[in-house]
Amino acid sequence: MTTRNLPAALVLAVTLAAGLQLAAQVKTEVPAPVPGAKPVSVERVKIHGPSLEGNLEGNAVDRDALVFLPPSYAREKSRRYPVVYALHGYSIGAEQWAGEIHVPQTIEGAFALGVSEVIVVLPDSKTVHNGSMYSSSVTTGDFERYVAKDVVSYMDAHYRTIARRESRGLVGHSMGGYGATRIGMKHADVFGSLYIMSPCCLSARGAGREPSEVEKALEKVKTPADSASLPFFPRAQLATSAAWSPNPKNPPLYLDLPTKGGELQPDVLARWAANAPLAFVDQYISDLRKYRAIAMDVGDQDGLRMDAARLHEVFDRYGLAHTFEIYPGTHTSRVADRFQNHVLPFFGKSLAFEKPRQ
């Protein structure tokens, strides 16, 4: 077990909104180019999502994805590859996520440093309110199943993948870290290795009144498209409500907010709490034991580090094999370095590759 600067107090609950607010588009440190790195190929594709059909928000069913093919892919026509699925955070999509982790440079760098070649996929889950929470909702669509089933099925049908769970890795950062945690727990039959980066939203939201300006801003939203003009915090509230407290009988937004008339709505908060991994992780320990490897990391200046440490403690309590590292950095500052020098090497060691041909 790898630990560093583990906080002594683990009881502070990070509010959902605070976790999401850290995930906005930012500039991140760029690792130095690796001499001799060979170029990967980048393909931009549309992946149809049957799991998203009929969603009440009108989120796109045919969605963008970035596919990064390793240097040998075009040359070795009979070779098949493991696949790493990398999930982005709140308020950004696949293209912005690619910028934050500086791909393809970091993928090329990892391969040049000796990591075994894999295919890397960045699916897009940005919604009308800026984020799906990778959850299952009639309002947003079932993004949990979209990632675990639709995207995986598309990749296996269109690329030379090794189409078995032992050869699929799942990783995500911030909201994507939440997604990797949630999807990883519920779909251990699909993925074989799991890496959780600075996950948001692990714990239930604490009680407290919403600032009056937030509630007033939300009252002005009459259509889903109106949320585009909202500040970050109110828009994140809509995204979370659409994902975790959908209501098909409450048009035009088809969601229930956690406050109404300045008063907390306990039933809505309970629905949100039910989506907190720290509340349901105990139900999925046997599923998590199926993974070939699990890793989690978070920066020592990241406001989400305490919840990440709490999840680490749960894993330890059950004797679940995993690694956990608190590294020097903020929520986003080192994400590209982590992707090149930690995430991809992790999958290079933990995923199942083709046996060399004789």
Image: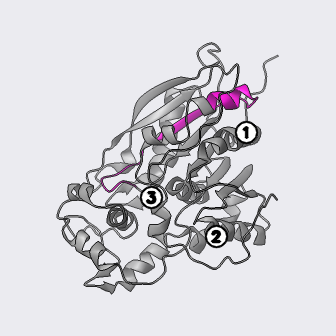
Element under disc 3: loop
Q: Would you say residue 314 is visible in this rendering?
A: yes
Is-magenta flag for residue 109?
yes
Element under disc 1: helix
> Which is closer to the viewer, label 2 or label 3?
2
Element under disc 2: helix
Q: Amino acid at mark 1?
A: Pro
Q: Which residue is mark 3?
A: 133
Q: Is residue 211 above or below residue 19?
A: below
| Image quarter hosting the N terminus | bottom right
| Image quarter hosting the C terminus | top right
Is-magenta flag for residue 180?
no
Q: Is residue 290 above or below residue 76?
A: below
Q: Residues within 10 Å of mark 2 (few under 14, many from 20)?
A: many
Q: Residue at x 58, y 23 (%)?
A: 40
Q: Amino acid at mark 3?
A: Met
Q: Which residue is mark 1?
A: 345
Give the CA separation, mark 1 to mark 3. 27 Å
Magenta-highlighted residues: 107-131
Q: Earlier in the sequence, mark 1 or mark 3?
A: 3
2 and 3 marks in contact (CB < 8 Å) = no
Q: Is residue 349 above or below residue 183?
A: above
Q: Position of residue 11 (x, y in %)?
A: 64, 79
Q: Position of residue 224 (x, y in %)?
A: 23, 58
